[in-house]
Structures are given as C-alpha cells and as structure tokens.
Amino acid sequence: MENSAYQKALNFIHGRTKFKKIPTLERMQDFCRRLGNPERNLKMIHITGTNGKGSTTAFARQLLMEKGFKVGSFTSPFIIKFNDRFCINGKMISDDRLVEIVDEIRPIVDQMDIDWEKRGGGPTEFEIDTAIMFKYFAEEQVDYAVIEVGLGGTYDSTNVIMPLVSVITSVGKDHLKYLGPTIKDVARNKAGIIKEKTPVIIGNVPEAAYKVIQSVAAEKNAELFALNQQVNVEKQPQRDWGERFNYHFEDAHYQNLIVNLMGDYQINNVALALTACLMIAKQEKWQFSLAEIRNALEKTTWPGRFEKINQEPLIILDGAHNLQAVKQITKLLKTRFKQNQIYLIMSILQDKQSEEMLAELLTLPNVNVILTRFNSPRPIADLNQLKEKFPQIEIINQWQLALVKVIQNMSADDILLFAGSLYFISEVREYFVNKEEEQ
C-alpha cells in the first residue's frame, strides 16, 4: 500500500480536536456501541498514574507474553511511530491494517459529527485512537490487553471498559491544569478507573491521595492492594545495569528478581505489574513459574526510559518530563553515577514546572546542563528566562549542535543524558536509530 493512504489516515486522526470543553464518557460509549462494543470481548488490565504507566504496562505485557498469551498493549504518547500505540506481543500494528481500520470507522465518525453537533461535536483524536485499539484487539482475539489511560481516569476514553484489575501507579502534580487544582482532585480523577468489585493496586502515593483512593475503593466494594502494605519489595544491591529486589504478595515470595530498567521506581512499577498478573492468574486459574517471571522481567525493555542508546560514549535517553520524574532521575544519578561527569541535554515544554525541574537537577555537583530546542508540536519553555535564573546552565538552540559539542568534551567515564520531554526523546532516538542503521 502506498504511503499516501497511511498519511491520509494519520491526517484524519491528528486533524481531530484534542480536548472537549465538557468532559463526558457518553460520546465514547456511543462510539463503542456503533462499533458493536468490541471492548466487551477483551480481558484487560487498566493502568493510570502520573508517572510509571508505560513501564508498568511493559512489565505486565512481558509477563503475560512469557506465559504464551497473545497480549495487546495500548500506550501513549508514541516514542518511535504512531503505530506504536497499538501493539500485539510487542509488535506494532502495520500501516495497512491501521488504514483498513480507519477506513472502517471513518463513516461512523462522520455520522457522529452530525449526531453530536449540538452536544460538543463528534469524537476527539484520543477517542478515535481508543476505538482503533478496541477494534484491532477484538478482531485479533487477544487473550489479554494492557490498557494505559491517556489523561486522568474518570473521563478518559479508555474508562468505558470493565477490567479484571485496575492499577494506579502514582499521583503527582503534572496535569493540575486539567485535573486539579489540588493533589486530591488528581487522585479523585485517577480513582475514576476503579470499578465495582474489581481489585485495585496502587503504588506509592501521597497520604492525601491515598485517602481519596481508599474511599472511592470502599464505595465501589473494590479490594485495595497498596505498595508497602499488602505488596512489599526490598531493594538489593546491584552492581551491573538494572535493579535487583525481593518481592512479597500473599503467598508469593520471590528473591533476587532482576530488571534491566534502571531506578528504584522501576522496582515499584514491576511490583505493580507482577501483582496485577498474579491476581489475574488467580482469577483465571493458571499459574506462573518462577522461571517465567525471571525471564519476563529480564526481557522487559521500554524505549526512552533511562535507555542506553550508545555504549561508548555512554548515551542515555530518558523521558523525564515532570518534577516527579526528575526527582526520581536525580536520585538515580546520585546513587549510581556519582563518580561520573554527567552532561545533560534537555528540552522542556512550556507547561511543565521547568524551574523546579532544573533546581532539582542542579543539586547534582557533577552535572552540566544544556537547554535546547527540538521540532516540538507544543511550545517550549523560555530558555533565556531560565538562563537568567540559572546562570550556570548553557543554551544551545539546536540539540544536534549540543550533541556534537558534548561528545567533543566527553572523556571515557562521562555520561550524556537526554531528557525533558517524551516528544524530544522520540526525535533524538530516531536520530540514533537511523545513524546505527547507516553504519
């Protein structure tokens, strides 16, 4: 199929409005009904949270795949290509198949634009993404699907589902503008994914958020399992790349599990994913062997999450794009890389807490921060204003030039880290992947 049909399909999706003034699930429910409710044929894990959704999804997907299941995963934003969002067993949907599905749903969208004209208009871009996913996974008859929320929970278009288990990875201040104004509001919104009598697993969340989630779970008769309460992990020393830990939940006790993703927070993410999968195994009457769990965790990779893209010199990509993620990465750099000189090339979007993020990173005595720009779909933070506040940072407007300069200055033990926005990481990653293919 020639590329123009694929490009037309993408233009159709990206040409839709992103947000509606009045949030509602009714439009998505209507959309699903017109599609024949494909979501009702799916067994799902539903995952929300300020940070950690993507990695938790990756671990859950790999665990279920290791058992031999056919597993769908729905994630956002994409790191490599739009099709990334819709994967089966880790393989993205083909261009041809995406075009087919878009062609099938387009007349439904056109009709909904007419029918919903007086009620705020037809489906949004993300509602169309969600519909594509439901249709694709149902037609492919996946055994399980791991579904990541787009934003929030309550009114997210994925929230029309009845999952086997719900997961809330973390609650932070990233989207206060949409979900706030307080952390309790964000927690209430994320707790919107909790369904009647459906177990819910939560990661480390602030006390105020925990209370909100606890009360919603009680209202819905949903059993609540929290990290450091019913689910426990103990970090173990790890010399090599990755993390090592012990895991305890009910009668499951696993020692010295190893993951190839870096950071304490990845131990939390894997604990949530493993707990969700163990719960499903119990509900569905099958079991994991310890070997299957070990294999799955060691195989799990996730692009742009402290990802080693080059070995010599050591170049790492991380999608840290809000204060919570930056705090996690600062802690990781302090504990594991305090002997190394760190060069950090960052591009931050305007709506993020850029000053707080930089202040946190600059607590590292061994860091050199360079702020830059990239081909961003959204406005970038004011670099000159940030330079005034933090004179020790450097500004190089093109990240490619920043890269050249840093590599000239780096010694063998130094590290180069790209961070600040998932969109930025996506662009940088593409550059390195293409460069590797050319060699």
Image (tube, rainbow, N blue to C red):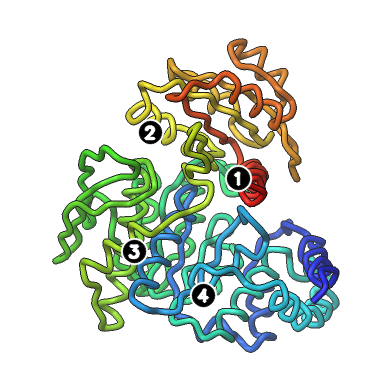
Q: Secondary structure at mark 4?
A: loop
Q: Are marks 1 and 4 in contact (CB under 8 Å)?
A: no
Image position of 285 (left or right of 5): left
Q: Could you tell which of marks 1 and 4 lies nearer the N-terminus?
A: 4
Three-letter amino acid code at disc 1? Answer: Leu
What residue is disc 3 on?
Answer: 296
Residue pointed to by mark 1: 422
Give amino acid for label 4. Answer: Ile
Residue at left offset 49%, top offset 81%: 142
The percent position of residue 44, horizontal first and vertical second, equals 45, 74
Question: At which x and y percent is residue 409?
Answer: 57, 18
Which residue appears at 37% of the width and 52% of the height? Answer: 269
Q: What residue is rendered at 47% in x and 42% in y? A: 306
Query: 302 above or below 91?
Result: above
* Residue ID for mark 2: 332
First reached walking from the N terminus: tag 1 or tag 3: 3
Instruction: Quote the CA–CA distance across marks 2 and 4.
Output: 36 Å
Image disc number at residue 161: 4
Foreground tag (4 vs 3): 3
Which element is circle 3 on?
Answer: helix
